[in-house]
Amino acid sequence: MELDFIRKLVKPAKTKIVLLIMDGIGGLPRELDNLTELEGANTPNLDMLAKKGICGLQQPVGPGITPGSGPGHLGVFGYDPVKYQVGRGVLAALGIGFDLQSGDVAARGNFCTIDENGNITDRRAGRIATEFNQKLCKLLQEKINIPGVDVFVKTVKEHRFLLVLRGRNLSGEILDTDPQETGKKPFSARVKKDEANHTAELVDNFLDQARQILQNEHPANMVLLRGFSERPNWPTYEEVFGIKSAAIAAYPMYKGVAKLIGMNVLETGSTIEEEFSTLEDNWNDYDFFYLHVKKTDSAGEDGDFDRKVSIIEKTDKEIPRLLDLNPDVIIVTGDHSTPALMKAHSWHPVPTLLFSKNCRPDKVDSFGERACITGGLGPRFPAVDLIPLALANAERIEKFGA
Amino acid sequence: MELDFIRKLVKPAKTKIVLLIMDGIGGLPRELDNLTELEGANTPNLDMLAKKGICGLQQPVGPGITPGSGPGHLGVFGYDPVKYQVGRGVLAALGIGFDLQSGDVAARGNFCTIDENGNITDRRAGRIATEFNQKLCKLLQEKINIPGVDVFVKTVKEHRFLLVLRGRNLSGEILDTDPQETGKKPFSARVKKDEANHTAELVDNFLDQARQILQNEHPANMVLLRGFSERPNWPTYEEVFGIKSAAIAAYPMYKGVAKLIGMNVLETGSTIEEEFSTLEDNWNDYDFFYLHVKKTDSAGEDGDFDRKVSIIEKTDKEIPRLLDLNPDVIIVTGDHSTPALMKAHSWHPVPTLLFSKNCRPDKVDSFGERACITGGLGPRFPAVDLIPLALANAERIEKFGA
């Protein structure tokens, strides 16, 4: 369904919805006991919700597609990630918590090494230390001056940085300056569309100045720019779903994605307990809460099966605090799977439960990958179905047609 | 998902995928034991793959739609058969193994009977014997001469033949010459679009000559042409999925469909054992193998329940040879169901298993229609999901978004 279709049917209500995203929650069974992280974890509270609620497994983007954090979240938030694509420059800005404004153009930067002829000898400048990167970004930030635009140069990590241009009539329709191989010169800024001609001039100006400023900073004596993109102007949660929404997340990327769709990002401590406290403290002020647990994913990425289990169990222990608030709808899911066995995000569908007094329970009586297969939500349903279902359960969608 | 979306995410790998299509594999339970052909067959190897893999039932085209062989295969191959439609003339060419070239226009022909006024008295010329058809096609092939184009007239069966025009600037946008009822004259070639004006003249020239040549061949003294169509120019498997693919199929239709999407059609013997030998012999040269077992469908069409069971069992016996090759991903499915009880293709979803070391197993422990319903792939999933899932399991799809 298109967002425009839902938008016409939403109606106000006093109900409250909580979306708990356990990052990378889905897993794969290990040989020891043939159980996944979630199946093996002791989760009496999540099991109770699964038993009383309706379960299934969702695909954030589509069959076989491994979602990055941005698309994974957008899918669960109800925004089709294939339609609502985020540029890589914008993702980089979100990733370090840069507060992108409407109209800003962002690009991912690499420090690189060039020889006396200007040809690239190392596209990553020997992966310089982050501290060196910080020194160089400070230098560029201080010295570069482009009339009419604000320039932001921010360290990401090692050789990677973020460039943001802020001004009038900017466009992200610019090709990468990175030729993707050594022995070649960096490209100057080439436009994809004529509307970007002015921006391309500004980028070339930036590149000229950067070359001058960095000339004695070998191996980081030049920069490459990729993924030029503008902050998107998408319909907000309030516009589409008619709800006042709040995000409780400790890491920049997740705050950033929430901001893109107009969620209010709440100040919070970073532990699971502190995030639930933030939920309690702000309970009266919003209709919808997105609460993000990061460390399930980090443990999965590290290949630490047991740590992922223990973070799931830790999250489960906080569920009674959520229930004490008496929310009308609770969704528990992830933005993708991160099986500890793969040490990476994966395409496997994500276990999901939806609990509300209005839902039609299925026969699933525990929260786990294989249990969810036979749940009422289906074994591979599109993640974008979740928010409309949550709104319906929260009595926030009108009848369609007489 | 659109093919263009997948195309941007595929990445190279050394992995190998085998797609085993048992034609018409799906069935219906007979009264004797309430088991379908597949449920009743003794298939220890397929059951083992189902147990270790992930199962479900797919719909090649859509709910309630009975696929022909062309659309059924295209769906499983990952090409939405509603979007990628094959003209009937082209299907006829594929069916007899005619090697269509890009730009060729093909039509299905009928020999028919006309009276002295030129009105049709029998649209099928009394279903003349195939031998008579062959004589007439030879006659037309020898005598018809249209400057600037090559004309091919090929026997199909009984009253049916294939016409192909090969030349420059041809178009398939021409309406049927068959008025679909007796007592009327055949239409001349009428265009759907102006671009076909030149082709229509050539077709009229063909019809005039055919009328002359056949005038004494009663009851086959005229022809009707239908389903004009051009060989489609679709993106190939290599272009879209980044894989080098091979087709192992003994019958013309299946080789033809494979060719349409750029698969390399391997020379093979026609028995199941010989097809598996062809697989072994070519194992090192391709990333992807489509292996087609025809006789499950033929038995279904004949209403021969027991023969269909025995062909399933025969195929099962070859599975260990497949496993010895150690493929990274195996898919076993069909292009549609052909229940022996119906003696025809049907709309019923097709049992499917996907086996790989990266798949998340479900609780299905045997390969059969009812067992697959509770599988992780879902009970009625779109066939086009299969190849993206296979590519993901073969580690050939990049993460989407950071």
Image: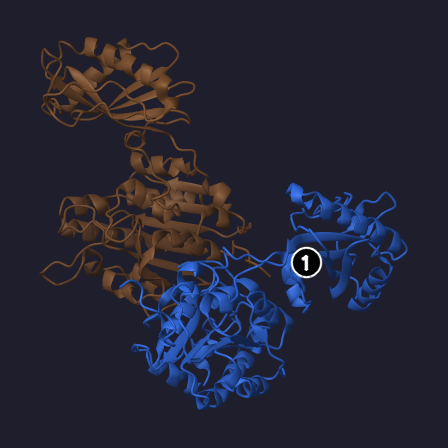
Chain colours: A blue, B brown
Q: Chain under label 1?
A: A
Identify the image quadrant of residue A129: bottom right
Give percent across and percent down for residue A350. Answer: 45, 69
| Residue B243 in the figure: left or right of residue B339 | right
Is A373 in front, or is B196? Answer: B196
Label 1 neighbourhood size at 10 Å, few (<14), some (14-19), many (20+)? Answer: many
| Residue at (72, 48) in percent of width and height | A199
Total numbered circles: 1
Label 1: which residue? Answer: A104
Is B352 in front, or is B306? Answer: B352
SS under mark 1: loop
B200 up-or-down from A337: above or below: above
Residue B326 visible at all:
no
| Residue at (41, 38) in percent of width and height | B261
* Image quarter of the C terminus of chain B: bottom right
| Residue B317 in the figure: left or right of residue A63 | left
**Which residue ends up furthest to the right in the rendered image?**
A216
Is A279 in front, or is A160? Answer: A279
Give percent across and percent down for residue A7. Answer: 43, 64
Give percent across and percent down for residue B340. Answer: 15, 50
Give percent across and percent down for residue B262. Answer: 44, 37
| Residue at (15, 52) in percent of width and height | B306
B370 up-or-down from A393: above or below: above
Residue A360 visible at all:
yes
Mark 1: which amino acid?
A: Asp
A230 up-or-down from B234: above or below: below
